[in-house]
Image (cartoon, rainbow, N blue to C red):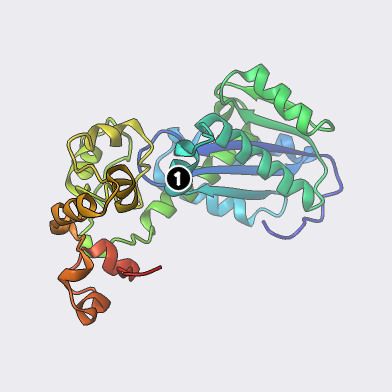
Amino acid sequence: MESTPEWASQPCIMGIDEAGRGPVLGPMVYGCLYCPLSYQSSLASLHFADSKTLKEEKREELYENLKLDKSLGWAVDVIGPRELSAKMLAVNKINLNEISHNSAMGLIKQVLDMGVLLTEVYLDTVGDPEKYRIKLSERFSSIKFVVSKKADSLYPVVSGASIVAKVTRDRALREWLVEETGENINRNFGSGYPGDPETKAWLTQHKHSVFGFPSLVRFSWGTCTTHLKSEVEVAWESDEAEESGNGNSSTKRQSKLSKFGFTTCESRSEEIESSGKGRCKFFQARKIQQITQF
């Protein structure tokens, strides 16, 4: 719900939950559901439940129903695989728990900024429940926080948030725009969890010796590291040149990688280089050209 609801000035409760924390594929989605405190007793009649216990058809039905309910508001935060991996592998690393905490707090701030009077927020815990509660209370001192394990099974408002998050993630995966379309990528990747044999087979089928995995994959996951241990190690030209003191070794290394789509500038005419003909699909898709001068 983007617009501020009519009941925003009344004391309101919110539930927050996530979907896709563990999979190696696709986004992690945080969802929230909020409503007037006076509507809390009616939530049970909506038959929300932990999204993991429901079939996809039922989740979709409940999701469409809650969107039509004028007494409910909802929002999502979709964190893509690239963003997850970039944060977890940055020089100043941000671990998954912190990413999760920041996403939940971002949703709270978003709803508060809309003018909704949040007085109680219920969350499924990430890490130690009490430490998480204290962290939230220090950020939002006017709100009462209840942080619990299995909150999506205990509190209907969190169950509703669980459905919002799960349906959003499932739809995102189904409709995911795969950038590497030229690589004959299929969508039969199973559940996306590292232990799923179908997911393992998909990762093996779609890894590239130099470029690794498609953008759908969270390359910071340990599963990916295992898959890429035997692949090509790339040394960038500038690093190689600095170590050797001349450009000879870098040219040699570039020649070794030519079969993967890297070429020295002398080996192609300007016309061919500009067209990208015969180059790796990674370069073609992104219209990346090799330059000879900076």
Task: Look at mark 1 in the image and give the residue it sits on.
Answer: 58
Residue placed at 31% from the left, 40% from the top? 191
Residue 68 spot, x, y in % from top left? 63, 57
Under tag 1, what secondary structure?
A: helix
Q: As shown in the figure, which amino acid type bears the numbered disc 1?
A: Lys
Report the side of 123 relative to 191 (left or right).
Answer: right
Rendering coords of residue 173 (x, y %) = 38, 52
Pick the residue in front: 230 or 173: 230
Task: Indicate the quadrant containing the N terminus: top left, top right, bottom left or bottom right.
Answer: bottom right
Residue 274 in the image, given as x and y percentages of width and height: 27, 78
Residue farthest to the bottom, as pictured? 271
Q: Assign the C terminus to one quadrant of the image.
A: bottom left
Q: Is residue 151 visible?
A: yes
Residue at figure coordinates x 28%, y 65% from the top left: 283
Establish if 80 lies above or below 14: below
Considering only vertical position in the picture, is 270 above or below 206?
below
Residue 276 in which image quadrant: bottom left
